[in-house]
Amino acid sequence: MSNQNNNYTVGWICAITTELVAAQAFLDEKHEGPEYVSPNDDNDYTLGKIGKHNVVIAVLPDGEYGIASAASVAKDMLHSFPNIRLGLMVGIGGGAPSKKHDIRLGDIVVSDPYDGNGGVFQYDFGKTIQDRSFRTTGFLNQPPRVLRTAVNGLKAQYKADGHQLENAINGILKKKPRLRKEYNRPGLRTDRLYQSGVVHPPNDGVSCAVTCGDDPSTLVSRHERTEEEDNPAIHYGLIASANQLMKDALVRDKLAAEKNVLCFEMEAAGLMNNFPCLVIRGICDYSDSHKNKEWQGYAAMAAAAYAKDLLCKIVPNKVEAERKIGESLSSQCLQEVVEAHRVITQKHLEIQQDAVKQKLSDKQKECLQLFRLTKSTEDTTYEWFKDRVEDRVQGTCMWFLEHDHFQEWLKQESGPLLVSADPGCGKSVLAKYLIDHGLPRSATICYFFFKDQDQNTVRQALCALLHQLFSQKPSLIQHAMKQFDKDGQGLINSTKSLWTILGNAVQDPQVGPVITVLDALDECAESEFQDLMRNVENQFRSNQSGHGKLKYLLTSRPYEQIVSKFRGLLDAFPRIRIPGEEESEIISQEVNRVIKYRVERLAREKRLSDQVKGHLANQLLRVTHRTYLWVYLVFDYLKTEDFKKTPKGVESIIETLPKSINQAYERILNKSKEHWMVRKALGIILAAGRPLTLSEMNVAVNIDNTSQSIHNLDLEEEEDFKSRLRSWCGLFVSIYYGKIYFLHQTAREFLLVDLPSSTTIPTELQWHHCITIHHAHTVLAELCVRYLNFLNSDASLLTDTTLEAGHYIDSYAFLDYSAKFWGLHFREACISNDDAVMALLALRICNPDSKAYSVGVIFWT
C-alpha cells in the first residue's frame, strides 16, 4: 500500500459522470492519481484538496446505478485508501415538493436525522408500485458527529448571512467556460411542477415543454422567490433510497406526507448502517414522469458547492479523531449491504410480469406462455425448483461475494464463471442466494436449476431462460415471433431454434447486461451436456465481436468430464473459475455457522440448558469431514432421538452419530423392518422416467405377481400412503407438491452399483450400492406391463370417453405413466425371450385388438 494513499481522509462518491465533473471543479488543488490501488479495485480515482482536507473522489461504473454498485465502489475505495474517516455521497436526486417544503429545481437536500432515525431510509419500491403503500427496509445510521456539527454550523451561517453558492458556481463556470452549456442554471420557465395527476405520455421522447405544455390548469402555482429568500434553497431532512428510479408523483406525495421525505435517490442505501456518510443531493427533477436532464448539471454543481462549504467548516484534527471507516465497515456489514440492496424482490418481478402481459399482443402472450412449459397451475415450474432449495443461514455465503475471482467476474462485460465443489457443500444454496440477493440488479438475471430426471434437459433450460428474459425485457420477444409464426407450439421442441432465439436476444442493443445462472451442471442429461457447453462457448465467441454483455455463472461438482468440456472457455476467459473444493477452510467455517444456528433451534425445541447447548455445539464442531448435507441429516437424527439432557448425555449421543453421509443414509433405511418394500420403492424412484406422484407410487408398490385386477389393489388413502412411504424411506426421499424425489443426488449415487456388471455388495453397509440400474428398470418394466394388462382382463375398464374427460379414480393413477414409459423400461431391462411371462404380457399390450393397446394409443398420441 502506498503511503501517499494514507494522506486522504475524506471519501467522496458520485453516481454519474455529471456529478464527478462538478466535484472535480470544486477542488482547490488537483493531485496526481494514486501510485497504487488494491488488486481488483477498478475504481477510477480523482485526488485533490478542498480547504485543508485531502479528498479522494470515485464514481460508479458507467451504466451501473443503485445500492449494490455504491457499496462496491465504497468497499474498493476503503481497501485502497484505508485512512478515510469521513464519507460524502454528493450528486443529484428527485425532489418531493409539498405545502410544507417548497422544494424547487436546483435546490439542495441534505440528509438529516428525522424522528429518531438516520437521514436516509431504504424502502421497498416493489410494494410502492403495486398498492401505493411502502415498507421501510432499513435506515442509514446517523452521519458522524463531526459532519452533523458542521451541518448545524453551516445552517446557522446561511441563516444569518445567506450563502454564496450561486456565486461559487458562476465563478467555476467563468474559469471553465466549456461547462457553461451543461452546468449553467436553466431558465425559470423550465422549472415546471405538474399536478400529481398529470402523467407524461409513456415512451414519448418529446420534451414536456411540447407534450405537456404550460397550461396553468396542469401546473402547481408557486410564487417567485424574492431576494430575501435563498435560491437555491437548502433543505434538511429525510432522503428515501431504493434500487429503482422514483417516477410516480402519487407515490412521491404519499411518502412525502407519511414520512416527511424530501428527496428520492438510488445509491445511499448501499452504504447502509456502517458507512458514516452525509448525503447531499441537488434537485434535478420532481420524482415524477416528467423527467429530463436539463437541470442535472446545475443540480450537481449546487450539491458540490454545498459539500465544499461544509468541508471548509471542519477542522482537520476533528477528522483525525474520527474512527477509520474501514474499521467499522466489516466484511459482514458489506454483505448485509449487498443483501439489503435487493429491495425489489419477488413481488417486483410479479408486478413486472403483469406489466409485461399488458404490453404484449395476444400472440406474443401466447408465445411467452409457451416458454413456461406448463399446462396448468399444478405443473412444476423453473421457479419451483429454485424455491425448494433451502435458504442460506444468516452470515453464510459471504466468503463468495468477496472472493477476488467473483469480484473480477462482476467487473467483466461478459464471460463465464464456474463454481465447482464437492457434493453437499451448498452449491445450490449459494446459487439461490446469488439469484435472490447477491447479483447486481443492474443486470437481467435468469436462472435454471438442473435436476436429474425431472428438469435435466437443455430444452427445458432454454425455455426457462427465454421466459425470464422476455418477462423482464418484453421488447425482446420480437426475436421469437418469426419462428413462433412458423412452428407454433412446436417451437419449444427445437433446441436449435431456441439457441438461435436466445443468441439473437442477448445481442440486441436494448438488452443491457444479462447474467444467466445454471445450477448443477452435473445433473444435466449426459447426452445433452456437450451440446450445452458448445453453444455456451459459441455465445461468448460471438459476443467478442462487440455485441452483448452476457455472463454465465455455472455450478457443478468437480468432475473431470465436466471441467474438461469447460476448458475451452477457461482458455478464452482466464481466471474465472472458482474451485470451491479448494476453499475447504472457508466452507468449514460456513458449516460451523450452520451448526451453531441448528443447535440454537434444537435447544429451543428440546429446551436444553445453556450448558448442554454449548457442550453440544462444541462436540459437533469437532467432527471432521462435515458438509451442509451431513449437518442436515445429523440434526434430523438429533431431533428424533431422546437423549439425556446432560453433558454426558450429549457425549453419548455424539458417539452414535453417523460419521459420514453414507452412514447417515444407511441408518435412515435400516429403520424400516419392511426391507423388501423399501428396496422396491427405491428401485422405482431410481429408474423412473419422471418423478412419480404419490398416487402413482401408491399403485405401483401394490402391484405384484399375485395381482389380478386394478380394482383389487390394496390402496391406502393418499395421506396414509405418504406416512407409510416416510416410514419406509425416512429423509432419504423428499415429497414436494405430491411428487417423490431423492433427498439429494448423493442418495441416488449411494444406492446405485457403480458398474452394471458388478456383483460385489459392500458388507459393512447393507444399502450402499445395493441396486443396479438394470434391476431397477426390470422392476418398473414388470409393474408397468402387469398394470397395462389389467386393462385387457378388467370388465369394469373405463371407456375411452371417460379417459379423455380425465375422470380417473385412484386405481387408474398409474395409467398415464405405464402407457408412456413401459417401453423405455422394457428396453433398458433387456428382458430376454427366456422370461416367458414378461414376453407374453408385453405381446398382449402390443396387440392392436387388445384393450390395453387402444387405451395406450390415447396416451401415445
Image: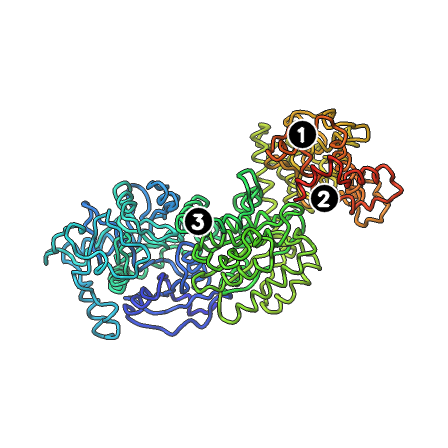
The answer to whether one can see residue 494 in this image is: yes
Q: Judge whether 728 appears above or below 489 on screen.
A: above
| Mark 2 / mark 3, whichever is N-terminal | 3
For the point 23% across and 75% down, the residue is: 177
Whole-Å distance between the Cαs marked 1 and 2? 37 Å
Identify which amino acid the numbered label 2 is placed on.
Answer: Arg
What residue sits right under mark 1 in the picture? 798
Total labels: the figure holds 3
**Residue 3, x across and y down, in percent:** 44, 69
Helix, strand or loop at label 1? It is: loop
Q: Which residue is mark 2?
A: 748
Residue 553 at what x, y percent from top left?
Answer: 56, 57
User: Which of disc 3 and disc 1 is earlier in sequence?
Assistant: 3
For disc 2, the neighbor class at 10 Å (few under 14, some 14 to 19, many from 20) is many
Residue extending farthest right: 834
Asked whether 596 or 125 is in front, the reply is: 125
Between disc 1 and disc 2, the foreground one is 1
Task: Report the Cα–Cα distance between label 2 and label 3.
Answer: 44 Å
Secondary structure state at the residue bearing disc 3: helix
In the image, residue 774 above or below residue 91: above
Question: Which of pointers 1 and 3 indicates the residue nearer the eye?
Answer: 1
Q: Is residue 97 left or right of residue 383?
A: left
Q: Residues within 10 Å of mark 3 (few under 14, many from 20)?
A: few
Which image quarter is the C terminus in? top right
Residue 424, given in percent of the width and then of the height, sits at 65, 47
Task: Write down the quadrant of residue 278 in the picture.
Answer: bottom left
Which residue carries the number 3 mark?
A: 362
Tell me if residue 648 can be seen: no
Percent position of residue 299, x then y: 25, 61
* Amino acid, disc 1: Leu
Of the pair 834 and 253, the residue shown nearer to us: 834
- Looking at the picture, tell me which residue is in the foreground, 770 or 588: 770
